[in-house]
Amino acid sequence: MRRGEVAGQEGWSATPERPTESTGVMDIEDGSKSPLAVDAEPSEQRKVATLEYSTPWVAGAWLLAWVINNIGVNILNKSAFQFVDFPYPYALSAVHMLCNYLGAEVYYAVKKSAPQRKVLSPEQYKTILGFSVLFAANIAIGNASLKYVSVTFNQVMRSLVPGMVMIMGGLLLNKTYSTQQKLSLIPVCFGVMLACKGEMYFSTLGFFVTCFCVALAASKTVVSSLVMTGEMKMQPLDLLCKMCPLAFVEILTLSLLSGELSSIWSRWDEITQVVFLMHSPYTAV
């Protein structure tokens, strides 16, 4: 007699056993299914499968790559302002947005196993539009501040961003942070100040512009965490694909209204000649 046909006989249950789906997650000792995998949703199964990759070494490698990229971009931006005579921060920011979008699209074209892009509702697109304005303002004003301050001063001020994120997270999202997290900000800021001692210069305007840039960077971090972990739960590159074209149009419009594009067009031959001479093998010797 099969289970579930007669209730109450020899301990058989009247409710048939619910079949479990195969998740591919096995226990190490006896090969049985892991409790984490039983009755798990597909998204939860992916989380279980990727837990082994979330190691401190991987996180540290990504953090180091971000720091190197951040410093490198700031140095290149400052070089464009000083050595190439390209005092157009908004146009430069528009180029950044275009490159971000193209890089994300190339990733999705090459990486066939990339996560599927999320289909957004009209209300969610409004959220992306608002976030693109914040993102564009952060990039554009950050690049503009480099015209008035040194790269080292810019980095010292940006080391305050984690502290601003904690303050905004506590005020806006009611987040709490441990004492260790708060104290960890002290050696970070102090270490950056020691590394940049004697190499900082800034104007009064540059100081206030950089402070505003720090506030924008902290706001962008808080909002991006909501977009990627909240109700929308967007992948980072998918977010770039949807947001960067909007930010590109917004910054390009600002560049047009400020007269940057007309100035670039009138100096096009001069700018291209300077860039050619900088990359010429004869001047590099």
Image (cartoon, rainbow, N blue to C red):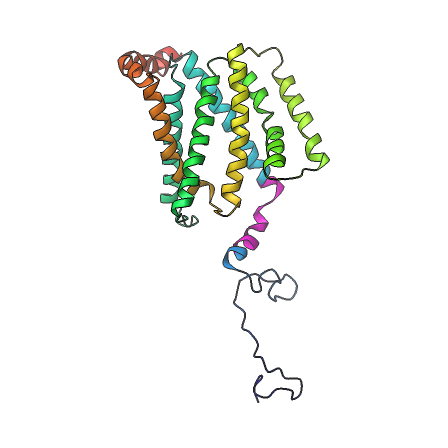
Looking at the picture, how far across and down is residue 269, in whole percent?
27, 13
Residue found 34% across the figure and 30% down from its top = 249
* Magenta segment main secondary structure: helix
In the depicted structure, whether residue 47 falls above or below residue 207: below
Q: Answer left or right for 98 relative to 9.
A: left
Residue found 34% across the figure and 15% down from its top = 275
Q: Quadrant of residue 177?
A: top right
* Residue nearer the viewer, 256 or 86: 256
**Number of numbered discs overlaid on the protein picture:** 0
Quadrant occupied by the C terminus: top left
In the depicted structure, whether residue 44 falls above or below residue 172: below
User: Does the magenta run of residues contain 285?
Assistant: no
Residue found 59% across the figure and 36% down from its top = 172
Q: Answer left or right for 196 relative to 266.
A: right
Q: Quadrant of residue 204?
A: top right
Q: Residue furthest right?
A: 179
Magenta residues? 46-58
Q: Quadrant of residue 218?
A: top right
Looking at the picture, how far across and down is residue 3, in whole percent?
58, 84
Looking at the picture, how far across and down is residue 211, in whole percent?
55, 20
Residue found 58% across the figure and 39% down from its top = 59
Looking at the picture, how far across and down is residue 127, in whole percent?
44, 40
* Residue nearer the viewer, 61 or 8: 8
User: Does the magenta run of residues contain 48?
Assistant: yes
Quadrant occupied by the N terminus: bottom right
In the depicted structure, whether residue 89 falls above or below residue 166: above
